Amino acid sequence: MVMSKELEKRSGVKTNSLTVIQAINNGLQTMLELDNDILLLGEDIGKNGGVFRATDGLQQKFGDHRVIDTPLSEAGFVGTAVGMALNGLKPVVEIQFLGFIYPALEQIATHVTRTRTRTLGHYHIPMVIRAPYGAGVRSPEIHSDSVEALFTHLPGIKVVCPSNAYDAKGLLIAAVEDPDPVLFLEPMRLYRGQREEVPMNAYRIELGKGKTLQAGEDVTILAWGAMLPIVEAAVEEMKQYQISCDVIDLRTLYPLDKEIIAGSVQKTGRVVIVHEGHETGGVGSEIISIINDTSFLFLKAPIEKVTGFDVPVPLFALENDYLPTKERVSKAIKQVYEF
Amino acid sequence: MKERYPLFQIMNKNGELLDHAYETEITVDQVKSFYYHMLRIRTYDQKGVALQRQGRIGTYVPFAGQEAAQVGSALALADKDWMFPTYRDHGASLTFGADLDRMLLHWNGRIEGCLPSREKHIMAASIPIATHLPHAAGAAMAETYKGTKNAAIAYFGDGATSEGDFHEGINIASVFKAPVVFFNQNNGFAISLPVNKQMNSQTIAQKAEAYDIPGKRVDGMDIFAVHFAVKEALERARLGEGPTLIEAVTVRFGAHTTADDPSKYRDQEEINRVREEIDPVLRLEKYMKHYNIWDGDWAATITNEIKAEIDEAIQRMESYQKPNAADMFDYVFEKPTWTIEKQKESIISTGRQS
Ligand SMILES: Cc1ncc(C[n+]2csc(CCOP(=O)(O)OP(=O)(O)O)c2C)c(N)n1
Ligand SMILES: [Mg+2]
């Protein structure tokens, strides 16, 4: 991002051109250096450096007491991380793919998210759960699930999803420092795409804040993670029709950035929401509820959603038909514009 | 514990019988069938790796090294038994009667590959680790409930023993004396994690003690040992004596999947060096030569037959009708709900967009 190059000049902080996965690796390294209470747990994260190499080199650098290869046991190591957090540590756990988080769901729903409440604030769980997620990389069955809404629905955990390398590091550090549990979703499709200038120091991006990627007047587009490149391609196409779009990367899915949503919708009056998770009960429906509460009288057209369908994410032969496409997004933009 | 669970072997590395108790049970036809099936699944496996390299299929999961474990166990099953395999057990599925075309379509991301057979009870390979162990217990209990003598077998790896579902599945099966065989293939690794970091126990077989069921540790490179251990466990099951845990000690010769680089976490060169010496297919070949039942012409004939069978199936896979985007809506419910109807309609009206 140009901004960070300028930042390097202004602040004298060194930057490197990194992919999303490298930025996550760098963010983890930065935090391991800063705080001895932070440790990493997960399957194949040590010697192997993680199946996507998110933790590459970290066990060599920080030792196997801080970068821990756990047995194949999601309920076990998430529960263990709860115990560590109760006792003052700050575990960052990796779930190998979001589709394999389900064995840990009990720990998350009954302990990770509730400990602060049920101990009247005496204990809290400063844990980060990282999980690669999403379709579009020809993964085997179950590896492509996009179930962020299961977690935005659970009280007591924040849900974050970066769409680029700069945000990935800044959001990750903010998540690690957050005193409460955070689910950190990493769109697999973006892991090795674009590179960006990423500062080598510890910087934070506030959780709960979206970002305007492109300012426009006619249509608000709300999306996150791997949907943004698709949105941007559709928005580019819309320029030939003189349709200008306000593109917002929400970045945090719980709590949602009510102000950025309302501000944009009150400007444009037309909204398209794009997400890859299933339509029913998806985060998109929650966004519509925020628009209803904040901006109902500003709307000029019914809100359009472009989402995954109410079907299990298909095997890869059909995954691109499941995923929102540029064509589906373009069609929705035209529909709200021409209404 | 290792002494309490000695490695059960029937033939040694050189293909010579160690345990003559089984001599009369081993027939020439059976040995030939073992060899044929191991050769068949090995050919399939080599094709799988090659097709992935050529970009003709997606990620492939190789099982080379585990042929004796998969064939020896699958051929112990009776027609009506239930098989619950993992993503690495397509060798066992094919041997038990899975449809070759479907087993290939699976690697092309086709949902057709999730139903290995319409005739045999072979479940879709379980991808979330250990989740199918309780299913095997339940399917077996249903057979008991119906008054049959049919049994079930669940396949799983060393890593799977760390999941709760492993314990819950075996515990329930042991309480209800379900006719099920828990067939573990201990190939030494769960992706990068060696088995000594997976568990503190020295064997997997010993975990049976916690449930008071028999546990047996067998040489997974010895197809006779695997076969007769599974057969005896199935006999126990059919007699109403409950589940057995079998640990077949084996080696994963290759990568975890074609997306994995084993040199990151183990001495792959060393495995390549010892591979031939411990190869389960070669061991049976040595046995056949040692006991004068090896027939070079026969071996050449089946090699060619198998190649032709698999090449033809690959052609069918590659010319298989293209998937239709609307198909993804068809089997979520018996009758689609209105949201699914609406979504399906939207895809049909806009046409295929990818
Ligand atoms: C619940 C769950 N967690 C993680 C994974 C990712 N994963 C796939 S295979 C595997 C290792 C399995 O090892 P093992 O049980 O020994 O079987 P093997 O692959 O060696 O046959 C892991 C961690 C998964 N599939 N399911
Ligand atoms: Mg294993």
Image (cartoon, coloured by chain):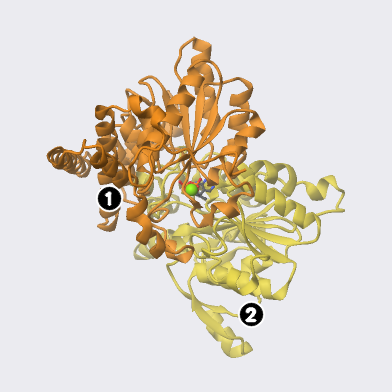
Q: Nearer the viewer, mark 1 or mark 2?
A: 1
Q: Is B91 on the left or on the right of A125, as rendered?
A: left
Q: Is A330 on the left or on the right of B37, as rendered?
A: right
Residue B96: % across, % down? 33, 30
Q: Identify the chain of the residue marked 1, using the numbered disc in the image.
A: B
User: Any atom of ligand 1 within 8 Å of the CB at mark 2?
Assistant: no
Estimate how packed mark 2 is, as few (under 14), some (14 to 19) or many (20 or more) residues with alpha carbons within 10 Å: some
Please name the amino acid that badge 2 sits on: Asn
Q: Identify the chain of the residue marked 2, using the numbered disc in the image.
A: A
**Quarter holding residue A166:** bottom right
Q: Which residue is mark 2?
A: A201
C-alpha distance separating marks 1 and 2: 48 Å
Residue occupying the point 54% across, 80% down: A3
State whether residue A108 appears in this view.
yes
The answer to whether tags 1 and 2 share a subunit is: no
Residue B152: % across, % down? 46, 25
State whether residue B352 appears in this view.
no
SS for callout 2: loop
The colour assigned to chain B within the rendered structure: orange
In terms of depth relative to the viewer, which is nearer, B74 or A61? B74
SS for callout 1: helix
Residue occupying the point 44% across, 59% down: A189
Residue occupying the point 39% across, 40% down: B222
In terms of depth relative to the viewer, which is nearer, A97 or A274? A97
B148 up-or-down from B183: above or below: above
B93 up-or-down from B264: above or below: above
Q: Which residue is mark 1?
A: B46
Please give the letter of the chain rendered in yellow.
A
Please name the amino acid that badge 1 sits on: Gln
